[in-house]
Image: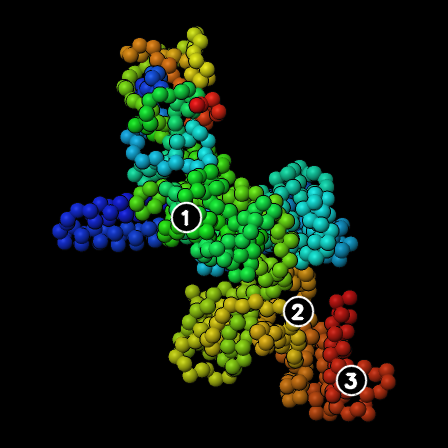
Amino acid sequence: MTGDLLIARVAGERFALPAAAIQSVIELEQIVPVPRAPEFVAGLATLRSRTLTVIDTARSIGVRSDSPSPRFALVTERNGCGYALAVDAVEAVVAAEGPIEPMRVKLADGWMRAALGTVPCAEGTVLVLDLNLLIAGFALGDAT
Amino acid sequence: MSGVSDMILARNELERQLDGIETNLGVETAFSRLAGILTDLQQAMTRARMQPIGTLFSSYQRLVRDLSAELGKRVEVDIESGQVELDREMIEVIRDPLLHIVRNALDHGIETPAERRLAGKPETGLLKFSARQTGNEISIAIIDDGRGIDTQKFVDKAIARELLTPEQAASLTARQRNALICEPGLSSATIVTHLSGRGVGMDIVRASIERLGGKLRIDTTPGQGSRILIDVPLTLSIVPSITVRVGEHVFALPRSYVDEIVRNSAEIEGERIGGLRHVAARDELRPCVSLSEILGLEERVPATAQTLVMMKMIDGSAFALGVDAIVDHGDLVVRPVSPHIVDTNLYVGVAQLDDGKPALMIDIAGLAATAGLVLEAQGRSPLDLDDRSGPGFAPDLTQVIVFNGLDGIRKAVPITSVERLFEVRVSDIGQGGGGPHVVYEGRIFPLRGLSGALPDASTLDVLLLNSGAQGLAFATNGRVDASEIDLATATGCGGQRVALLDGATVELIECSISDPWSDLAAPASPTPSCRLPTDDPWCREFLLPLVAEAGYRIVEDRESRVDLEIVLDQPAATGPHPALADDVLVIASNRKRVKQGSKAIHRDDRDAVADALRSARQGKRA
């Protein structure tokens, strides 16, 4: 893996996403809920004149999050639609120092499914998650 | 377009910010100037995004050629785009639904040359595309002259699936039967070909058209062909909307669905019928659903204090949607929203309100489905036997433009033949060149409907009719209005048909192209020509209209060859030119000269003259 990694924190865990795929980091203010949407869709937020679909990242992964409602979000885009991945904190952007290594250890269910692998970097070895899976919300129903 | 919409939203945001702070006059002036420029820019951009719809139609030509070759059919494509332009984005979105309709027409509609020959049609089938713009909407028609759609199959299937009882089926009107074509799961394809009949049926096409806020209608006549009419909004992104509040949520409803808005009360609130809440408004019982209930929100407002938005669906069915309050109405820029949200079938997109908050645009058709109204909606279009309940259900009424002619007679012309209405200065009406004419957008149109002298007024409202390739202008004397006429009431009076409208008669103006349907039904045959002695006053005044009505083209010059020559057996009349005519009709002024077995006809015997003209014409065609 080359390029920069964006390291964020959700449900108390650290993870990384390819920084190139993240357009910006925003502070979430008001989220307009969407009735009847899947659980991991927290609602809609506006960024200037764009409307973003806010993904509750912890629910999307399928892990329990004890933290209060997330304050930050990572903005990305798929097929012309903007998404904001809500996270508890954004820690750093660092350069990857090696290729993605397949997972060699067993992780908790949700993390295991969302993980692409691990990457060494200046912050140590971080878990890289699959952005597409986070947006698609593959862990329907697992969230509590 | 989104950039331009963003620009407008940014302007609104700035306006809000400026409102909150004390600014000096200079800032405000500069801002309002900027705001004005942005509005102009938006309009210019909107115009620049328009693309002629003819380009879209032409793109199907190759497909038609390839498919018809593959199917062993001969198909001619006729494109009449009427210079209509459509938003680029919109063109992309309707491309696939139209493609499906074209495939259906080729695969199921148009017959093989052998079948067509047997049916007495020209071997080459016709597939016609046409487009019209009416206000904010574009009407697209796709017409084929194939075998039509057997609606009985759909009725049988609907009965088999218990969507209809046999009694209900028996009382369906033609239009209600046609509406069944678009019901899910009733595809008529008994043989699945690789082109169509694979389950992606007309119901999907209708659903995708409806998702854009459009409408789809099918007319079909067995043996004669089918006509599919699609109305779509001019642009995709700007939707006239009503915003409503439910609890803390604000949602947008497309205004085109909204029939009226009523405040609920104990009188209106009806009973539960079959487990579904109903309300009675204007003596009409409609099912009622509460938006908060469908969306799974907490009910905050008691049912009787709700505001009821009366929704009218495309198939004419109606229901009431209970909301807490109406917030606003206006045009909203609707954007696509992520698949997660669209997949709920409740929302079509998202718009940003003036305060910057997002509001989801409700998918009315999906909402009705989620609320469990769809089964009923499926049944309702046929079940709703009251024809007055929906504009779409008026049986076989022809939409017309009614106006006063300069001769004071109220006239009607089918709305499909009217291109537009414009004003000309009377001084600009040109004379000469074979009759009065007007110039519109750089083209010359012959002007009809002037009864003799030009009117006294300084300007004249003129209807532009799409009669043939050339077009035609028709003078009116105001009171131009749209209405509907049952053409079954039309009767002929001396070549000019009149029809009944609101208890009075109106004269029908019939252009050759006024009804593309009849155009197709009667294969074009060359107009026979006829020469008659125009120097005789009786011929000019009485015979000529009769001949013209029988479908002859009048030839004036004495040298060219004609199909029929009419001569008078009077010494004064010019002798016949048998060498120049295929057929000669002799008209006698004296009854004694009309002998048994002779071809001569007495001039007072109007019916015999008409018969002779007709038989001469038929003889010619055979």
Residue B324: mark:
1
Specify few, some or many for label 3: CA neighbours under 10 Å numbering under 14, 14-19, or 20 or more: many
Residue at (33, 17) in percent of width and height: A12
Viewer-side label of 2, 1: 1
Mark 1 and mark 3 lie on one chain; the one further toward the N terminus is 1
Decide if residue B399 is in sight here: yes
Q: Which residue sits at x=52%, y=66%?
A: B418
Instruction: Check if mark 2 and mark 3 are on a common chain.
Output: yes
Residue extending farthest to the top is A104
Q: Earlier in the sequence, mark 2 or mark 3?
A: 2
Q: Earlier in the sequence, mark 2 or mark 1?
A: 1
Q: What residue did someone put label 2 on?
A: B488
How many labels were placed on the picture?
3
Q: In the structure shown, which secondary structural element does the residue marked by tag 3 occupy?
A: strand
Same chain assignment for discs 1 and 3 = yes
From the viewer's perspective, is A111 left or right of B221? Answer: left
> Where's the C terminus of chain A, which quadrant?
top left
Query: Is B586 rendered above or below residue B103?
Result: below
Helix, strand or loop under label 2: helix
Q: Which mark identifies residue B601?
A: 3
Q: Position of residue B33 (x, y in %)?
A: 22, 54
Residue at the location (74% across, 88% down)? B604
Residue A121 image point, x, y percent: 31, 12
Residue closer to the observer: B323 or B559: B323
Quarter of the picture containing the N terminus of chain A is top left
Amino acid on which disc 3 is placed: Ile
